[in-house]
Image: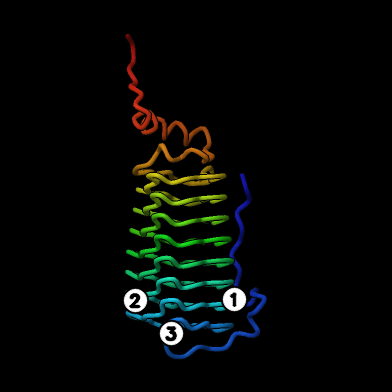
Amino acid sequence: MPTSPAPRDLDDLPYAEYLEPFGGEPERDLTHDTLRFDGDDFRDVDCGGAGFTECAFTSVSFTGGRCRRVRFNDVWFHTVRWVGTDLVETSWMDAEVVSGMLAGVEVHGSALRRVTFFNCKFDSVNVRAATLRDVHFVDCLLRDVDLAEARLDGVTFPGSTLDGVRFDGARMKGVDLRGAVALGVASGHGSLRGAIVDGAQLLDLAPALARELGIEVRDGR
């Protein structure tokens, strides 16, 4: 089982000394470089197509808003909240999210590569048809998360709780579920092909897998 990574502090970031405080609101189709967003409360912001490179977000909240096709490249988030935000077709690369919350957020069709979530809460998040490569959910809660039709490659869940997660039509490669504290799969058990589970998890999944495969289990003759 892979070792869980550890979150970094702001001062650990290689670009920390170059960060400049940001004022105002993020703008559409504009690249935001080496900026620090601290304590901002963005409501219904429209920053579609914007880019964020080597930026840090601390204690920031997004309520509503359209952030479609936003690019997060080498970005660090700490205690950031997204509620009802449109993050459709966004791109995340080399990002780190610590103690964040996403509730009622649309992330479908997005691409996440080398992204780690630490102690984050996902509640009713739509991640359908997204691509997740080398993504790690460490000590997270995923409740009513929809990963239908998503592609997962090298994804891990150490210390995380899955509650009502849907995998219908998902495609998996090297997905390691062994470290998950709870494996509550609501649907799409047949799409777990390519996932790694331990013996106890397999026993928990067995009834649902049998139903998915049309196997009838009877005791006795």
Quarter of the figure that contains the N terminus: top right
**Residue drawn at point x = 49 percent, y = 61 percent:** 111
Which amino acid lies under the numbered mark 1 shown in the image of this protein?
A: Leu
Question: Quick one: label 1, few (<14), some, or many (20+) residues within 10 Å?
Answer: some
Q: Position of residue 63 (x, y in %)?
A: 34, 75
Q: Nearer the viewer, mark 1 or mark 3?
A: 3
Q: Which residue is mark 1?
A: 10
Q: Position of residue 98 (x, y in %)?
A: 51, 67
Vertical position of residue 159 compared to residue 114: above or below: above
- Horizontally, residue 177 falls left or right of residue 206, namely right
Q: Which residue is mark 3?
A: 27
**Residue drawn at point x = 61 percent, y = 58 percent:** 5
Q: Secondary structure at mark 2?
A: loop
Question: Quick one: label 3, few (<14), some, or many (20+) residues within 10 Å?
Answer: some
Question: Quick one: label 2, few (<14), some, or many (20+) residues within 10 Å?
Answer: some
From mark 1 to mark 2, how far is it between C-alphas? 26 Å
Q: Earlier in the sequence, mark 2 or mark 3?
A: 3
| The furthest residue to the bottom | 23
Colour mode? Answer: rainbow
* Corner quadrant of residue 134: bottom right
Q: Earlier in the sequence, mark 1 or mark 3?
A: 1
Q: Secondary structure at mark 3?
A: loop
Which amino acid lies under the numbered mark 3 shown in the image of this protein?
A: Glu
Which of the numbered marks, if any, corresponds to residue 54? none
Q: Nearer the viewer, mark 1 or mark 2?
A: 2
Q: Secondary structure at mark 1?
A: helix
Q: Position of residue 21 (x, y in %)?
A: 53, 89
Q: Nearer the viewer, mark 2 or mark 3?
A: 3
Quarter of the figure that contains the C terminus: top left
* Corner quadrant of residue 106: bottom left
From mark 1 to mark 3, how far is it between C-alphas? 24 Å
Q: Which residue is mark 2?
A: 65
